[in-house]
């Protein structure tokens, strides 16, 4: 159509011109506004109505409304359906509009952030949403990046800048980015930047975080662009005063948003079950209608002719078949209350109440940030009680991103932050405890969480091993130092591990002061000492260690090394055997406590030996072939015969309560999978720290294959070990696989005895997610108690969640705090955002927002379990009472000639679900609880019925249906038999239609009220008022409708004057009501009594105990005991990136005031033009390794 804009074609490549909005607008690139909301003012009504009528029940009621508008078949007035239908549609629409309003508000918070944009040769503050492709924007230190930028220039030498990518990949270590030399010359000169008119031709928007290709054309020359020239939205600028960048991708085109996934319409499993049940009930209703229509046709053909005169019908006006056809539709209308519209109104109100309970829970309120828990949606509460799998991010979700130096082992002695009492038990360290006295503490302004004074005594006594240990921490690192405006020393750290170690050395008197490409200056106990830096042997993921070679003022050459104990212990001199054994025990203890460990060693080098080695290294650096292999061989050669000094233990500080939460959720039979972008060692270490992985596990399988065949082989090998038997496979190819294999048999899981864990890398996961391997992955993973996926992309996180959702038919929950978790949060049945340090992206996309991971325990075990329990009880009761209410019409049809006459009057039918029985069931659905919140937390096993869907399923529904049918039989046939040929106390006949209807209606209200009183486990004032108030309301309305006053006002609507009073004044009627109540309720009471005492459930037992112990409940401590490793396990983890050693020795990241190196290895590296390319190449994990035994003999 002409008035619609032309549909935008998919991009093949992108062309962007700097500072030229008019040129870029031709391509209709997306602006920088983000949308997580579902509706706007124009689309709300059509989209919301479409979503609501996707519910089978809503479509069913609309169909009934249309039928009721046909007078020939309707014996009920149209308002009995349209009023509740409009009410439920309106309430749901208001709720959805409210939810979306908050999404709009959150979007606006992000879109209205300020950024400095270069417009008309001036820097102007502009909202993020107004930033356009091609704009040049200025970023300052610690600012979030507004869009995907091409870095043009920065405050650092050579156009370098540092970014933290935690929100993209979960890694806290800093990444280096460098501008092109031609653009870095622009600096901060606004006039030069305003004249910049370069054109970038690059790839179309995509979700690949680690790849970028493009070309910048400027000043008649072309420059290749790579990922190292790009700063992505979601990054934070660190350790860089300012930088300028050109916007290439904005808003939904940014790689961050491309990884976010689409917002999905989520429904609970109970919603889906209710849709199925509504279809079943409709089928049941059709069957009843057909039976009654056939009965009407037979009755019309045999008996009906005798009544036609009284009904003013002409003899041949209507055939018996046509009469049956009309009767069918009439009974479809009359029996529609089997699924009343008020069911859906009540469900929405109950869910809203549960959401407010979550929002108001003070025990989930985080006082530090004044942040409560927030239910951002109101439709998923009961599914919180059915979670089987939790997919958790690591950084910022389980951890605080704070590294603390906790313990160390030096020369066979442990120095610990804990203090032991007289009995050798650990005392709690409080802030009041006296801190260690550090000489030269002018540079030790940071708080030191270390209270072992014996270490300071060893330093004061001049213990050479202790001094050498601390000297190593102050020398062997990539930290940069500078002074702030107040003259205080500030460290710029590339990884938080290094920051913790260098700060620890600083606080113990060995203060790293400054560095040049050739020297490192350390203040040792107040005395400045300058060491000559001779070589830097950089860290990488294969070496797993870092070394520096320095010459001290006395002329001694020493190599200081720190790294993984498993690697470094192989390099030790044989004389270290005893110390090695002792330190290994200490490391095992540290690892058992979940601390991140590094081994520390050194070696004294001969001057002549080092000179030869240095010449060989220079030759290797100049080599054109096998350069890396030769260099690594030389590193191996010099890093041998080391002398062990000890080990460090750093705590990657977990969020408060993480261990208790993980332990409790595991007891609730919830499987926890950690999905993180962090390195394997770090992820495993955190897994042990937070009890997801334990030393008591039988085995931890590590999958690290580089091809699909290798991955499949490793998965099946692990499965063999797990089962202890062989599984047949040939050449890695699956034999006779079928789709049914993916629907795993729960018996296989039960056959596994013992606890196992699975660890898999991102590149292996990519192969494992292929269709022919995913079966093996899923089968193995689901048999393991815990799974850790490391180095995964945001998209892979979502794929793992989808895999479990698709094939396990289990309820999943994803929890994270960064933008890299958004796609996972959207994919899971329940998405939870942690209001952490990494922005609001996760919270914006979530269904529930929490301040801390520990609140997840209460959210699931208390609110989730209660919501599921209440909703199930509500549904059971609701279906029961409506079957009992409606099926009386079916029995009555056999005594009224199948004429579609109702057994109750129309007002009772209209008010039964809306007034007489709505509030009691709402009170039960909102307030009921089987056990207290504390017992729900203390006994996580109570959570299991929700996972197994035991409280409401198809079997329970049929039981409720049978119960309702039995009650309806009692309601109809007991008064029918009682009223048969009976006279009242005044001698008059009382078996008239209205008296019969009043008796049945009264019996029904009393029976369902007694039944809900039996169903209610937790009584409040509201329950009492609603239940007994509803009974009183029924009698008030009944007597009012049959009174003279109402008759005078509405003579046609209420013609049965005095009938109610006359019927209820008969003792006989009350005896009938009592008999019906006893007959309906006593079987239920007897069954429940026997079940509770013969086969009590866990909640029955706890409830009984709760009543007995209500006044004095013993306080139970659930603090887990500190784990001790029964077998040797490395606690190595080091969040560091290769390439920073070369960056430091080149001097490229140092200010111009530092002198350039003049000779030796440093000069060669400084003049090497490929240093940044080497750094860029080394930022990703190396796939191919080299042999650690490969050495070069001198």
Image (cartoon, helix red, strand yellow):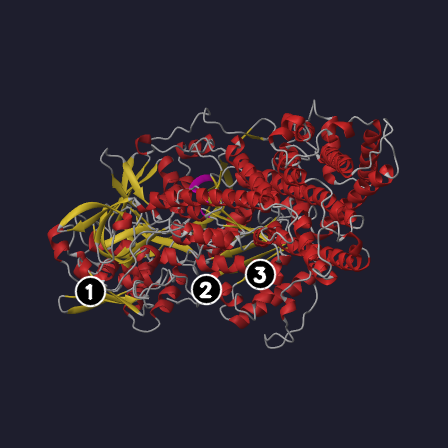
Rendered position, 315 above or below 952 = below
Q: Quadrant of the C terminus?
A: bottom left
Exactly how many numbered labels are in the figure?
A: 3
Q: Nearer the viewer, residue 915 or 132?
A: 915
Main secondary structure type of the part rendered in magenta: strand
Mark 2 neighbour density, 10 Å: few (under 14) some (14–19) many (20 or more): some
Left or right of 1166 in this view: 336: right
Report which quarter residue 735 is drawn in: bottom right
Q: In the depicted view, which residue is nearer to us: 458 or 662? A: 662
- Tell me, for residue 199, which label it has, or none: 1
Tell me, yes or no, if residue 894 can be seen here.
yes
Report how far apart the C-alphas of labels 1 and 3 lie in the structure: 45 Å
The kind of secondary structure element at disc 3 is helix
Residue at left 50%, top 53%?
51
Secondary structure beneath disc 1?
Answer: strand
Contact? badges 3 and 2 (CB < 8 Å): no
In reply to whether residue 404 is colored magenta, the answer given is yes
Q: Earlier in the sequence, mark 3 or mark 2?
A: 3
> Residue at the spot x=64%, y=44% of the render?
668
* Residues drawn in magenta: 395-406
In the displayed structure image, the side of residue 871 where residue 134 appears, left or right: left
Indicate the secondary structure of the residue bearing disc 2: loop
Which of marks 3 and 1 precedes in the sequence? 1
- The label nearer to you, 2 versus 1, is 1
Quarter of the N terminus within the rendering:
bottom left
Residue 806 numbered tag = 3
Estimate the x, y position of residue 1073 in percent, counting from the top left.
80, 33
Q: Kindly report the distance in space between the C-alpha atoms of the residues bearing marks 3 and 2.
A: 43 Å
Task: Give the number of the mark in front: 3 or 2.
Answer: 3
Whether residue 1144 appears in magenta in the rendering, the answer is no
């Amino acid at each position: 159509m002409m008035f619609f804009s032309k549909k935008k074609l998919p991009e093949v490549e992108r062309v962007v011109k700097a500072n030229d909005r008019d040129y870029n607008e031709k391509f209709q690139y997306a602006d920088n506004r983000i949308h997580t909301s579902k509706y706007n003012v124009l689309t709300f009504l059509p989209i919301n109505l479409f979503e609501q009528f996707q519910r089978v029940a809503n479509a069913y009621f609309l169909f009934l409304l249309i039928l009721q508008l046909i007078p020939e078949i309707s014996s009920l007035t149209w308002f009995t359906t349209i009023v509740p239908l409009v009410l439920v549609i309106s309430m749901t629409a208001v709720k959805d509009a409210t939810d979306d309003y908050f999404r709009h508000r959150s979007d606006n918070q992000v879109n209205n952030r300020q950024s400095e944009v270069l417009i008309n040769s001036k820097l102007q503050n502009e909202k993020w949403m107004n930033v356009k492709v091609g704009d040049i924007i200025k970023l300052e230190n610690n600012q979030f990046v507004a869009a995907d930028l091409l870095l043009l220039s920065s405050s650092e030498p050579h156009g370098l800048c540092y970014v933290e990518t935690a929100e993209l990949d979960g890694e806290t270590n800093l990444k280096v980015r460098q501008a092109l030399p031609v653009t870095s010359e622009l600096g901060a000169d606004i006039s030069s930047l305003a004249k910049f008119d370069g054109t970038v031709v690059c790839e179309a928007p995509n979700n690949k975080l680690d790849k970028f290709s493009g070309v910048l054309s400027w000043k008649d020359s072309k420059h290749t662009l790579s990922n190292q020239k790009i700063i992505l939205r979601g990054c934070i600028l660190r350790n860089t005063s300012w930088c300028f960048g050109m916007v290439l991708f904005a808003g939904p085109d940014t790689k961050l948003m491309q990884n976010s996934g689409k917002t999905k319409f989520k429904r609970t499993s109970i919603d889906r079950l209710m849709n199925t049940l509504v279809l079943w009930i409709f089928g049941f209703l059709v069957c009843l209608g057909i039976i009654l229509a056939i009965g009407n046709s037979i009755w019309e053909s045999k008996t009906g002719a005798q009544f036609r005169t009284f009904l003013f019908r002409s003899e041949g006006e209507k055939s018996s078949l046509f009469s049956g056809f009309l009767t069918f539709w009439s009974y479809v209308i009359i029996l529609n209350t089997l699924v009343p519209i008020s069911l859906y109104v009540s469900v929405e109100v109950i869910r809203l109440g549960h959401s407010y309970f979550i929002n108001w829970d003070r025990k989930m309120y985080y006082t530090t940030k004044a942040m409560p828990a927030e239910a951002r949606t109101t439709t998923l509460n009961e599914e919180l009680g059915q979670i089987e799998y939790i997919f958790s991010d690591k950084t910022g979700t389980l951890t605080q991103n704070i590294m603390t130096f906790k313990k160390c082992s030096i020369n066979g002695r442990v120095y610990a932050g804990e203090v032991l009492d007289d009995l050798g038990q650990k005392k709690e360290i409080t802030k009041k405890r006296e801190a260690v006295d550090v000489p030269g503490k002018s540079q030790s302004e940071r708080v030191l969480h270390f209270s072992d004074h014996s270490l300071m005594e060893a330093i004061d006594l001049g213990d050479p091993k202790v001094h050498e240990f601390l000297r190593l921490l102050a020398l062997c690192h990539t930290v940069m130092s500078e002074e702030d405006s107040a003259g205080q020393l500030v460290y710029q750290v590339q990884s938080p591990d290094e920051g913790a170690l260098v700060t620890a050395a600083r606080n113990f008197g060995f203060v790293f002061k400054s560095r040049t490409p050739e020297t490192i200056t350390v203040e040792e106990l107040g005395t400045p000492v300058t060491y000559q830096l001779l070589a830097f042997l950089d860290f990488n993921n294969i070496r797993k260690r870092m070394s520096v070679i320095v010459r001290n003022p006395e002329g001694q050459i020493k190599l200081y090394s720190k790294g993984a104990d498993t690697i470094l212990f192989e390099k030790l001199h044989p004389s270290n055997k005893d110390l090695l054994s002792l330190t290994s025990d200490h490391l095992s203890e540290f690892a058992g406590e979940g601390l991140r460990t590094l081994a520390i060693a050194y070696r004294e080098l001969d001057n002549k030996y080092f000179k030869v080695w240095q010449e060989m290294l220079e030759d290797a650096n100049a080599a054109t072939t096998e350069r890396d292999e030769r260099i690594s061989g030389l590193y191996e050669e010099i890093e041998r015969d080391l002398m062990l000094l000890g080990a460090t233990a750093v705590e990657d500080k977990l969020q408060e309560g993480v261990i208790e939460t993980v332990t409790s959720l595991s007891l609730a039979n919830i499987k926890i999978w950690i999905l993180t972008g962090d390195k394997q060692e770090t992820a495993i270490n955190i897994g042990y720290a937070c009890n997801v992985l334990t030393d008591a596990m039988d085995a931890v399988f590590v999958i690290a294959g580089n091809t699909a065949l290798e991955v499949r082989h490793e998965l099946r090998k692990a499965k063999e070990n797990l089962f202890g038997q062989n599984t047949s496979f040939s050449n890695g190819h699956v034999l006779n696989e079928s789709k049914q294999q993916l629907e795993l048999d729960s018996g296989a899981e039960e056959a596994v005895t013992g606890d196992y864990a699975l660890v898999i890398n991102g590149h292996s996961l990519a192969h494992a997610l292929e269709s022919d391997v995913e079966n093996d992955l899923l089968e193995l993973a689901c048999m393991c108690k815990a799974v850790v996926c490391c180095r995964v992309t945001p998209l892979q996180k979502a794929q793992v969640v989808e895999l479990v959702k698709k094939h396990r038919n289990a309820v999943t929950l994803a929890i994270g705090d960064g933008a890299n978790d958004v796609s996972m949060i959207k994919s899971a049945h329940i998405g939870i955002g942690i209001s952490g340090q990494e922005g609001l992206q996760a919270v914006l996309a979530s269904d529930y927002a929490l301040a801390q991971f520990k609140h997840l325990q209460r959210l699931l075990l208390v609110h989730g379990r209660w919501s599921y329990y209440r909703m199930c009880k509500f549904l059971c009761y609701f279906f029961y009472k409506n079957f009992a209410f409606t099926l009386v019409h079916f029995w009555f049809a056999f005594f009224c000639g199948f004429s579609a006459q109702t057994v109750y009057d129309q007002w009772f039918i209209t008010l039964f679900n809306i007034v007489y029985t709505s509030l009691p069931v709402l009170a039960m659905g909102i307030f009921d609880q089987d056990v207290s919140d504390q017992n729900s937390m203390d006994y996580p096993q109570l959570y299991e019925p929700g996972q197994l869907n035991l409280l409401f399923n198809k079997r329970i529904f049929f039981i409720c249906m049978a119960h309702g049918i039995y009650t309806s039989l009692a309601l109809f046939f007991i008064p029918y038999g009682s009223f048969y040929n009976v006279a009242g106390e005044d001698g008059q006949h009382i078996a008239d239609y209205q008296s019969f209807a009043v008796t049945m209606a009264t019996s029904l209200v009393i029976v369902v009220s007694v039944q809900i009183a039996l169903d209610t486990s937790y009584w409040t004032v509201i329950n009492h008022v609603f239940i007994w108030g509803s009974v009183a309301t029924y009698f008030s309305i009944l007597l009012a409708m049959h009174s003279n006053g109402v008759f005078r006002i509405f003579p046609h609507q209420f013609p049965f004057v005095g009938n109610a009073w006359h019927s209820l004044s008969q003792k006989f009627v009350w005896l009938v009501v009592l008999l019906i109540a006893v007959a309906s309720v006593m079987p239920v009471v007897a069954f429940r009594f026997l079940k509770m005492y013969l086969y009590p459930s866990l909640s029955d037992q706890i409830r009984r105990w709760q009543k007995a112990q209500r006044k004095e409940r013993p306080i139970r401590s659930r603090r887990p005991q500190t784990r001790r490793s029964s077998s040797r396990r490395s606690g190595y983890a080091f969040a560091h990136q290769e390439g920073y050693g070369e960056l430091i020795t080149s001097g490229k990241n140092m200010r111009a005031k530092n002198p350039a190196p003049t000779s030796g290895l440093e000069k060669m590296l400084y003049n090497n033009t490929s240093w940044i390319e080497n750094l860029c190449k080394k930022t990703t994990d190396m796939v191919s390794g080299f042999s650690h035994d490969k050495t070069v003999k001198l």
